[in-house]
Image (tube, rainbow, N blue to C red):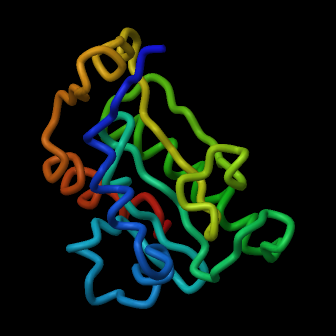
C-alpha cells in the first residue's frame, strides 16, 4: 500500500487543539486583521481560509456556535445565503474568477475539518486551475501571495457586503 502525506496541513491540525477557532474569531473583532476577517456583522463573519485549496478561498461563518445546519436560525441561514451571493460577485469582480465553488461539509463523515461550527466555503475557480501537484508533489501552487489576496479582497469587501 502506498501512503500519501500532506505535510502542509500539519499547521491546520495543530491549530485545532483547544477551543473553537471560529468562536475565538467571532469574539475578538479587535483581531480581525490578524485573523484575516473580510467582513463581520451581528450574526456572521467572513474569514479567509488559512489553509486554502485555492488562492482567494474564504468562508462565511455564523457567529453563534452551531454544529448542525438544522440547528441554525432560519434568519441567519437566509443572511448567509445573501452574503454568499455577494461573495460570489466579489470573487468574480475582484479576482476575475470565471467560476466559483460553494459548499458546506457537514459533520465528520461529510468531510468537515471544523465539524463543531458550521461554515460555508467559497472558492474562486479558473479554467485549468487543477493539477496533481498537491497529490504527487506534496505542495500547493498559488499564483498570488496569501496576504496580497486578502488585502485585495478586503479593499473591495466593504463596498460589496455593506450595500
Percent x, y of residue 75: 79, 74
Residue 154 picture quarter: bottom left
Percent x, y of residue 157: 36, 60
- Above or below, comparing residue 25 to residue 78 in the picture: below
155 sits to left or right of 134: left
Residue 5 picture quarter: top left
| Residue at image point 65% right, 48% down | 104
- Above or below, comparing residue 55 to residue 134 in the picture: below
Percent x, y of residue 97: 39, 28
| Residue at image point 27% right, 55% down | 11
Q: Nearer the viewer, residue 13 or 161?
A: 13
Q: Nearer the viewer, residue 72 or 82?
A: 72
Residue extending furthest toward the front: 1
Q: Nearer the viewer, residue 4 or 83?
A: 4
Residue 46 picture quarter: bottom left
| Residue at image point 33% right, 34% down | 6
39 sits to left or right of 70: left
- Above or below, comparing residue 22 to residue 87 in the picture: below
- Number of dots carrying numbers: 0
| Residue at image point 17% right, 28% down | 143
Percent x, y of residue 82: 65, 58
Amino acid at each position: 500500500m502506498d501512503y500519501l502525506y500532506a505535510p502542509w496541513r500539519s499547521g491546520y491540525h495543530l491549530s485545532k487543539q483547544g477551543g473553537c477557532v471560529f468562536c475565538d474569531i467571532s469574539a475578538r473583532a479587535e483581531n480581525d486583521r490578524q485573523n484575516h476577517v473580510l467582513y463581520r456583522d451581528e450574526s456572521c463573519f467572513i474569514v479567509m481560509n488559512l489553509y486554502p485549496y485555492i488562492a482567494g478561498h474564504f468562508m462565511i461563518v455564523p457567529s453563534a456556535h452551531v454544529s448542525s445546519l438544522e440547528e441554525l436560525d432560519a434568519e441567519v441561514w437566509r443572511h448567509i445565503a445573501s452574503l454568499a451571493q455577494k461573495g460570489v460577485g466579489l470573487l468574480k469582480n475582484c479576482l476575475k474568477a470565471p467560476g466559483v465553488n460553494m459548499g458546506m461539509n457537514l459533520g465528520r463523515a461529510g468531510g468537515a475539518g471544523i465539524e463543531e461550527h458550521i461554515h460555508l466555503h467559497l472558492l474562486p475557480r479558473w479554467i485549468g486551475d487543477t493539477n496533481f501537484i498537491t497529490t504527487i508533489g506534496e505542495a500547493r501552487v498559488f499564483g498570488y501571495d496569501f496576504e496580497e489576496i486578502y488585502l485585495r479582497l478586503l479593499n473591495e469587501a466593504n463596498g460589496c457586503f455593506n450595500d
